[in-house]
Image (cartoon, coloured by chain):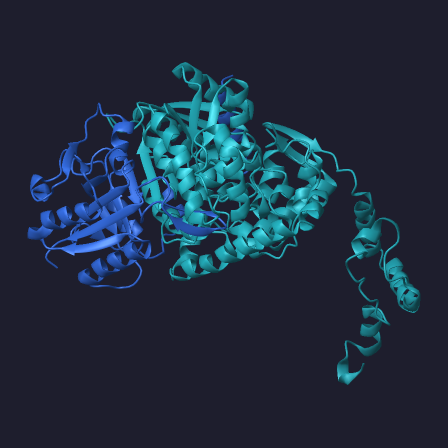
Amino acid sequence: MSGTFVGMPAFPRAAREAVGNTTLRGNLRHATHTIRDKRARAVAELEDWAALREAGKQIKDHTLRHLDRYLVQVEDAVTAAGGTVHWAADADEANEIVARLVEATGESEVVKVKSMATQEIALNEALEARGIHAYETDLAELIVQLGKDRPSHILVPAIHRNRGEIRDIFRSEMSEWGRPAPEGLTDTPAELAEAARLHLREKFLRAKVGISGANFVVAETGTLVVVESEGNGRMCLTLPETLISVVGIEKIVPRWQDLEVFLQTLPRSSTAERMNPYTSMWTGTTDEDGPRAFHLVLLDNGRTDTLADEVGRQALRCIRCSACLNVCPVYERAGGHAYGSVYPGPIGAILSPQLRGTGSEIDASLPYASSLCGACYEVCPVAIDIPEVLVHLRERVVQGGPAVRGGNRVVLKPAKGHAAERAAMRAAQWAFTHPGALRTGQRLASRTRRLHPRTLPGPGRAWSGSRDLPAVPAEPFRDWWQRTRGGKGGAK
Amino acid sequence: MSSRERILGRVRRALADVPDDAGPYEEAVARDYLREHGRRSVPETVDLLAENLADYRALVHRCADGQLSELLARLLSAHGSRTVVVPPGLPAQWLTAVEASVVQDLASSTAPELDEVDSVVTACAVAVAETGTIVLDGSPDQGRRRITLVPDHHICVVRVPGQVVSSVPEALERLDPVRPLTWISGPSATSDIELDRVEGVHGPRTLEVVLLGDS
């Protein structure tokens, strides 16, 4: 399967390729602009949006500050309701737990609800290696799986595909996996949805094991919540005999009442609906209704490392709505694949380098995949200050310093490739702490201004390739100030 | 060391900067958002429910108490349904006029058997006007979750105004989290093709809601 992000090139290189793909840019522009306007209308319907956003932020912050307590509460409540709780420190451990649980049922296939957590740990690939076939049942995930592709959006993983491409994938690939696409399939969305319905029906009806994530876990009751549109979630959550849910430890909310905030902000932020078509809530198991066995796998996989960063931990508030992707000018042009992670866009640019560390080329480049325009922060329903975290992570990449990796305190080395930036900053620091040298330098710059090149030489060339260098004034500010006493009496 | 202890230990170390008295839950969240949006009379709330249900392509019908059975019979025959599954606690008088053969939902019946059934009729637990949502909680007049999922045609009866609330916060107050809950807002849909909404994927492609009451 080509659906891997391992060994991805740094963001600028991947983005350059994507930007040259006019079909991709057209698809992304069309989709993101459609949803952008709709979201704005759905949000404008609620006059208390700002208060809901603040409450969502506070609930998540409070939970994270007491996460140890709430994790134990979740474990107790789910166990009391008839479920079994497993703890997975990393992706390998989570995959091992799930594979063993599936093997214990004697089954060799599972149906899956779209889940970011299982994408993150590459569960499908791990199960395949053990001879277990995992069928994605969300329409967009199905398109990605059939097309041997990678997801490029949190909510709509096949956003980079237009209807014509989807039809072609269905026509050529569905027969490999099960029921083939209907004869004469056209590219109207309704027909494509119908083809997916028919293709997956037989898989739902015979499935014995379902795998999901969860949008929320309520600590006081042990209730899990899955928010969806198509009904594939309901199929996977209620028809199989065994249900396994892999859930990041940051998905907890303390109380039942807290859902009243997120069930208002999530649908409007993600699909721009007052409410999504289906939301399922379950607490453990129920006699003669739904799965007889329920397993909850609590996943760390870098989340506690993220929690240890006082600035970066706010990324754990994310409820995966994808509003930040849809408004981002960089995402709109570069597409999701360039981010080299299942979490693309602005939230991916702060989440991936924290969950995975900044060691790889792609992760060290992600904090720079932004113009810092701040549109992502504006639309975020839990008020994650993404630009603040981006700048914080840039600092970490360039300067290195203390961080937590795999639960251990480490001191990161400054990244390679930022030598010029570091030298420039060191020079600036020296100049600003030596006023005499600064004055001499500024006067020299002013007097020689006609001789300045329009682009920077050496390592600065790339930077000035697409920017104008700031013009040096005829006279340094401090000289002007002294000469005119700050422009008093109209002096110039 | 177990992974449980490892993760809990990591969480505690990660939070070393947070003071122990970081504040109880009650003080942590300012709930100054609204309990409901706008002021409406009871009939206006029911009207809003009907409007929002229809906006997401549910078919809405109004019906007085004495006429429900005739209406259900008419809706089922208009849909061409020969079989209809019902939960065990559905009031028997709702079905007296129904001509389609009634299938009882048994614990032993399988999903493929259910897939052969044309329609399902249920009651509901609560309906939310602002979002056009009906919520099922698995009570005897609503049944197992799968019966409202596998058949392609769902008729849901909402007793108005008693079962109607304005908002999501009011709905949650009425619901019991221990029960398996399904929130339904229109027929199944997807936005996965070019982020445009298309109705009709895996859940029932036709959702009809009957607002039952002498209003």
What residue is shown at x 30% (from left), y 23% (from top)? A292
Instruction: Give the colour of chain A.
Output: cyan
Relative to residue A219, is residue A469 depicted above or below? below
What residue is shown at x 34% (from left), y 48% (from top)? A260
- Residue A90 appears in the rendering: no
On the image, the x and y values in percent for residue A432 come to 81, 56
The residue lying furthest to the bottom in this view is A489
Screen quadrant of the C terminus of chain A: bottom right
Screen quadrant of the N terminus of chain A: top right
Q: Nearer the viewer, residue A286 or B87?
A: B87
Q: Nearer the viewer, residue A211 or B80?
A: B80
Horizontal side of residue A196 vs A454, given as left or right: left
Horizontal side of residue A48 vs B211, given as left or right: right
Instruction: Give the colour of chain B.
Output: blue
What residue is shown at x 36% (from left), y 56% (from top)? B33
What residue is shown at x 52% (from left), y 25% (from top)? A89
On the image, the x and y values in percent for residue B60 come to 23, 54
Relative to residue B61, is residue A293 depicted above or below? above
On the image, the x and y values in percent for residue A364 come to 69, 39
On the image, the x and y values in percent for residue A216 come to 40, 38
- Residue A281 appears in the rendering: yes
